[in-house]
Structure formats: C-alpha cells, structure tokens
C-alpha cells in the first residue's frame, strides 16, 4: 500500500500563493452568489471584507505567476505566504468584528447601524423607496446558518486560510 501524504504537502510550495488566491476567489464567488442570485445586498462592512479578499487574490496570482516564469524566486515563497497569512488574519479579525456588530456584542460604526444612521440622507431613502438601491445596515445579518452570519463564516474561513498560509510558509522555511 502506498504511503499517504498529508494534505498540506500535496502541492509544491510555489503553488500555495495560487491556492490561497483561489480560496479567496471562491469566497468572492460565494459573496457574489448571495448578492446577485440570492438577492442579499451587502452592507458597507461587507464590501470592506470583499476588498481584503481582493488584495489576497491580486497578490496571490501575481506571486504565483512570477514563480511560474521566474522559478529562481522560489526562495521568497515562504515570505509571500506569511504576508498573505497576515492579510487573511486581518480579514478574520475584521469579519469577527462585523459578526460581533451583527450579534449586538459591541457597537458598530454610526454610519451604517440602526442606532447611528449618520450617513443615510433623504436622497438615499428616496432611492431605496424607488427600488434603485437598498439601504443595508451593518448590524443586521441578512442570512444565518446554524446561528452564524456570512461575516462569521468569513471569519472562520479566513482564519483557517491564514493558519494554512502560516503553516505552509513555516514548512517552506525549514526545507
């Protein structure tokens, strides 16, 4: 019987930036699916979380392509993974903060919560009434599964991806 290799060592170190970028891209596809297919409009904090994943996607694909065309750059791969892990850890923290706002554990920004309402103007209200664009508050979860909102799942998945990036980067430094 052939020896089984651990999942994290199935791919060469130089492919991990692409894999992490693909993970963030799948997160974006999920968010877009909820928005455009499920009609769950995102709030301002949801858009901010998407921007963080776009950084991971752009950086991961740039590093992955650079490694394909310049293999001698492979010695920098662990450091790129640590950087991607740091951005993903920030994503997990930001998403946790948003999930905490949705659960009422702490106050959110006054510009997008029911308590604040600071940035909602008369033209925003009229646009929402005309069906042109929704006013989505950051302290109200649009969707939950098992009591966890989309922001909560983003936090969990981003933390997992950050841990994978750190572990693979650490293993890459040892080899």
Image (cartoon, grey):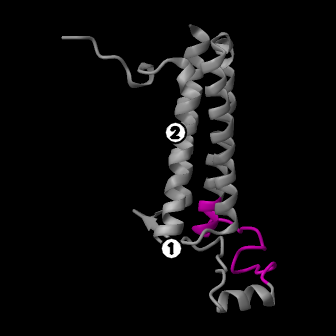
Chain-order first, disc 1 or disc 2: 1
Residue 51 versus residue 74 in the image, above or below: below
Alpha carbons under labels 1 and 2: distance apart: 27 Å
| Residue 154 left/right relative to 62 | left
Q: Residue at x 71, y 68 (%)?
A: 107
Q: Is residue 100 magenta?
A: yes
Kindly give the residue lying farthest to the left in the view shown: 1
How dense is the environment of label 1, judged by Cα within 10 Å: few (below 14), some, or many (20 and up)? few
Of 53 and 32, the residue lying toward us = 32
Q: Can residue 91 be seen here?
A: yes
Residue 142 versus residue 169 in the image, above or below: below
Numbered tag placed on residue 48 in the rendering = none
Contact, CB < 8 Å: mark 1 with mark 2?
Answer: no
Residue 12, position in %: x, y? 49, 17
Q: Quadrant of residue 77?
A: top right
Q: Is residue 156 magenta?
A: no
Residue position for label 2: 160
Specify the quadrant that holds the N terminus. top left
Mark 1 residue element = loop
- In the image, the segment drawn in magenta is 98-120
Specify the quadrant that holds the C terminus. top right
Mostly what secondary structure, the magenta segment?
Answer: loop
Q: Can residue 88 be seen here?
A: no
Q: Residue at x 73, y 92 (%)?
A: 126
Total numbered labels: 2
| Residue 158 left/right relative to 126 | left
Q: Residue at x 66, y 12 (%)?
A: 75
How dense is the environment of label 2, judged by Cα within 10 Å: few (below 14), some, or many (20 and up)? some
Residue position for label 1: 39
Mark 2 residue element = helix
Of 43 and 160, the residue lying toward us = 43
Residue 142, position in %: x, y? 53, 72
């Amino acid at each position: 019987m052939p020896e089984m290799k651990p999942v994290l060592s199935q791919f060469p170190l130089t492919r991990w930036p692409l894999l992490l970028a693909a993970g963030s891209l799948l997160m974006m596809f999920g968010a877009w699916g909820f928005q455009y297919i499920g009609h769950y409009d995102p709030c301002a904090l949801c858009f901010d979380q998407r921007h963080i994943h776009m950084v991971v996607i752009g950086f991961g694909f740039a590093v992955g392509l650079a490694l394909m065309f310049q293999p001698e750059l492979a010695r920098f791969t662990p450091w790129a993974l640590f950087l991607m892990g740091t951005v993903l850890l920030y994503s997990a923290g930001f998403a946790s903060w948003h999930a905490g706002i949705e659960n009422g554990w702490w106050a959110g920004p006054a510009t997008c919560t029911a308590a604040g309402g600071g940035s909602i103007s008369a033209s925003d209200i009229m646009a929402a009434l005309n069906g042109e664009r929704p006013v989505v508050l950051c302290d109200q979860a649009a969707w939950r599964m098992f009591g966890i909102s989309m922001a909560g799942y983003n936090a969990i998945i981003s933390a997992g991806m950050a841990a994978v990036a750190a572990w693979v980067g650490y293993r890459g430094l040892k080899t």
